[in-house]
Image: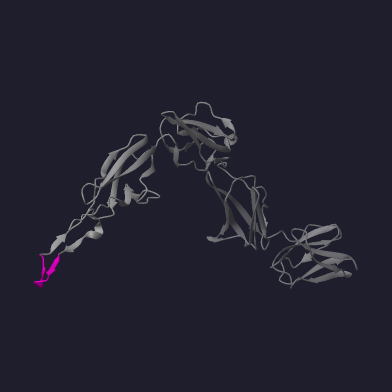
Amino acid sequence: MNVASTSVTDYGIYYVIVSGDCGLPQTSNAVTVDILSPDATLQDLKVNGVTVPGFTPSVTEYTYSLSCNTDRATIEGITNHPGASFTGLPNAALVPGDNVYSLTVTAENGFTTKTYKLNIIRECYIPRIVKDLEDAIICVNDSHTFEVGVEGEGLTYEWYYGNSRILGANTNRYTIAHAKSSDYERYYVIVRSSYNGYRASIYSRQARLWVSEQLPETLKFATYPDPAFTGSTYHLKLAGYSDVTEYVWRYTNDDVTFSPETGVVGENETWATFGTLSEGAGTVTATLTHPCGTREATQTIRVTYPTGVEDVTANQVAIYPNPTTGEIRISNTVANQAVRITDVTGSLKGSYRTQEGVTTIDLTGYPKGAYMAQYGGKTYKVIRK
């Protein structure tokens, strides 16, 4: 028997049976035919452990890109047939730009081969930003450095403030020293590269720089009453301090600290109202949190009883008892005249008509605090305790 050409399907055991007219058929010795595989394809091609994108065993040419900071590559292939051989490159040195390799697979049969062509491009002519610019908040007279990290060859830098080129700023860092309010702006950099005739450029992100005014060492309240009166409310205001992110108010009296009943933050200002205060001395503190640090405004206040009856001996009017737990009496009144009771802010709380001689007004339903009694063109301080 003569086998003209072989294939992997010809693998097997061959024998012949001879028969004739003179006797029983005779069987020859068996011969095993072992056909070696001609398969010279790869089932996978990897660079630094990563399969080349789009790899297919029947396609023989590929391009694979690496960043400029990768200067070596390990190339390995997995053969489709276990008997085939492939010699990879365990630590190939890469130059910037093209690195072309011819990779040959030899089939199990020893003479069938297949060559794969791989071009590894080390992208040193295309800059790549690996660390971009970040926004920042600084204070007047502070310094700040913007920095960009870029991979590439032949790099140059152009820094911009808004849309204006910053002359002399030609490295990957730009420092603002002794910042001014006018330095508040957008900053960015254009990075250009050049290698073997290739030219490319890339823009960083636009980073915002905020420059805050330093808070004064001593903060002052815009308005405050002095003294405050027992039972009254106490209103304080801070204004004109910009960029404050938080205000914390507190009042301390006899080692007791409490927060205001109301605390409001407006644009560049804050104010707070403390409720009924007890007699004595206390300290109001407002703590401001600011990008440039923390500041405190403090004010010692005196809380005292009002003087009671105003001195009006000319018309012999007197209000008593004062302070009172309920009723007050107004002496020497003329019949059918108006008496108005207001709080210390002037808000009307009650209106009454007088009787001839002595007029009695019941303040039992009024909250404890300071009030003003208006009669006969005069104003008298009255305390409800």
* Furthest residue in direction top, as rendered: 168
Image quadrant assignment for residue 316: bottom right
Residue 63 is a magenta residue: no
Dominant SS in magenta: strand
Residue 123, horizontal then vertical, whole percent: 40, 38
Q: How many marks?
A: 0
For this rendering, which residue is in front, 201 or 318? 201
For this rendering, which residue is in front, 151 or 107? 107
Residue 206, horizontal then vertical, whole percent: 54, 40
Position of 164 compared to 107: left or right? right
Position of 385 relative to 212 (above/below): below
Position of 162 relative to 342 (above/below): above
Q: Quadrant of the N terminus?
A: bottom left
Position of 84 compared to 252: left or right? left
Q: Residue at x 13, y 62 (%)?
A: 31
Q: Residue at x 67, y 63 (%)?
A: 231
* Furthest residue in direction front, as rendered: 21
Q: Residue at x 28, y 40 (%)?
A: 92
Residue 144, horizontal then vertical, whole percent: 49, 37
Is residue 93 among the parts visible in the rendering? yes
Position of 98 compared to 190: left or right? left
For this rendering, which residue is in front, 196 or 299? 196
Position of 289 relative to 347 (above/below): above
Span shown in magenta:
16-28
For this rendering, which residue is in front, 53 or 382? 53
Residue 23 is a magenta residue: yes
